[in-house]
Amino acid sequence: MLVELRDIDKTFGKVRANAAISLRIPPASIQGVLGENGAGKSTLMKILSGFYTPDSGEILLDGKAVQIHSPADAIRHGIGMLHQDPLDFPPMKILDDFILGRQGGLFPNHRAASREFRELAGQFGFALDPEAYVDSLTVGERQQLEILRLLWLGARVLIFDEPTTGISLPQKVKLFDTLKKLAAEGMTILFVSHKLEDVESLCTSAAVLRQGELVGAAEPPFDTRLLVEMMFGKELPLAPKKTAVPGGKILSVKSVSIEGVRLQIRGVDLDVRSGEVIGLAGMEGSGQSLFLGACAGLTQPVGGSFCLDEDERDMTGRSHLEFKKRGVAYLPAARLEQGLVPGLTLTEHFVLSEGLGGLFVDRKKAEALAKERISTFNIKGTPESVVEALSGGNQQRALLALMRPRLTLILVEHPTRGLDIESTIYIWSKLKERCEQGTAIVFISSDLDEILQYSDRVLVFFAGQVSPPLRAESLSVERLGALIGGKDWENLPKEAVNA
């Protein structure tokens, strides 16, 4: 299907999210849509998929102007969107989730739907059991389910919004193979991303948005430097990697065992020293989140011990609040659900974090604090901005701004998930400033380049197994990817691999 967007304009209050954008996407192609956080990419795609109505402009499908007022309208016109967080229902069975939105009355034919599901999944090599539950799936498998559902509903245009965020390298390879297969079959694919390497390796063309405007387009072979300049209006070189000079012991993990719902971790040993960065790598659900939560007192171990500071104060079994009092900060991946409070302004967040409350709040003092933090952390917002109105990058900056000045240990889940290059560089510059002050950092990331760029040492998790700490400079993306996939473990020191 030929998709044409003509002079699309969309304004939210004083913000012009899309400014007269025109774009033509032919069938059997994979159109990349690049841009920094807040560039207007998602707004444009939500207009095409019926979540938003444009203020002006028109949408043409195969040369015919159409009106799309809702996602249901979009599906009827053959357009489906797969969001960064797939829109599914974890308590439901896969088959029940699959048939959502299909016309056919109150009592769908589950037997026929199951047969069609298995046939469709088989075409793409998706190993999904229709009788399993959605909450048992990884992010990559949830994407596969949503692809199948949209195809079953008749989609001929598929929009993918940051689809490689939060999935492993093997899952990304599988996704890209699927998208290439769909394009070869005549589907029109729109691939929204801020990751240059993904667009360069997958897309047949790329459009670049900046501050709501279409600023340029490119075709293979792509010039990375030119794409960066179009995205940000300037070059953004990565800072050279700095190896930490470790100080005293901050955290001592001895023979720790943790039991989760679906896996167990046994006998983990790790000493974390001040000023160093430890990266936790692994497929989603391999145990790294369990371990990080235990380091914060959020999950209790069933064996072993956690000790803090050089005096090795035993914190085993202590609450998260007690860990916080000892200088441990935990930044969750779910920024709005766990890290911030939707409905509250930035000022109100800083009041809570700094303990400025009481019977009466000094509004002038609170607003002055908010302005100072907004300026220091370069947050694109005002003291009156509610946190859910901020972009993902600015929500992450707000989380950093809420941390207390003196910390012993920072534990971070996916510090740059969904963020553009500029935001990623900025977030890590702030984290590295903490390291220079003696704070240690332990973080989880599904981005192998991020793990290798910013870690001093790496722990690899695979199905509950934990590698010994590995020097980051001794690893390559290929070796790390193999370990994450369960390969090459026999070449690790046998006594250090925790079964």
Image (cartoon, helix red, strand yellow):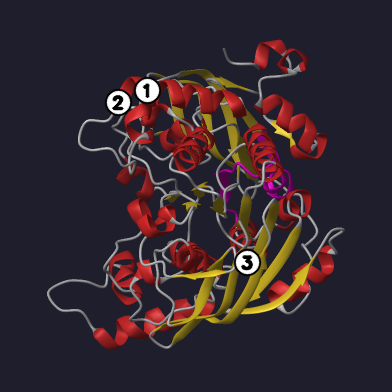
Q: Please say if 175 is above or below 84.
A: above
Q: Amino acid at mark 2?
A: Asn
In depth, the one of 155 and 461 nearer the eye is 155
Q: Please say if 476 is above or below 450.
A: above
In depth, the one of 393 and 54 nearer the eye is 54
In depth, the one of 215 and 63 nearer the eye is 63
Q: Secondary structure at mark 2?
A: loop
Which residue corresponds to the image point at 46% horizontal and 43% vertical from the top-left?
A: 150
Q: Amino acid at mark 3?
A: Tyr
Ranked by sequence position, the earlier of labels 2 and 3 is 2
Residue corresponding to mark 3: 426
Residue 430, located in which quarter of the rendered image?
A: bottom right
Residue corresponding to mark 1: 112
Q: Which residues are magenta?
A: 438-458
Give the Cα separation between the discs numbered 2 and 1. 6 Å
Q: Secondary structure at mark 1?
A: helix
Residue corresponding to mark 2: 109
- From the viewer's perspective, is 338 left or right of 271? left
Disc 2 crowd, CA 10 A, few/some/many (<14, 14-19, 20+): few
Q: Position of residue 283 (x, y in %)?
A: 58, 31
Cβ–Cβ under 8 Å for marks 2 and 1: yes
- From the viewer's perspective, is 230 left or right of 77? right
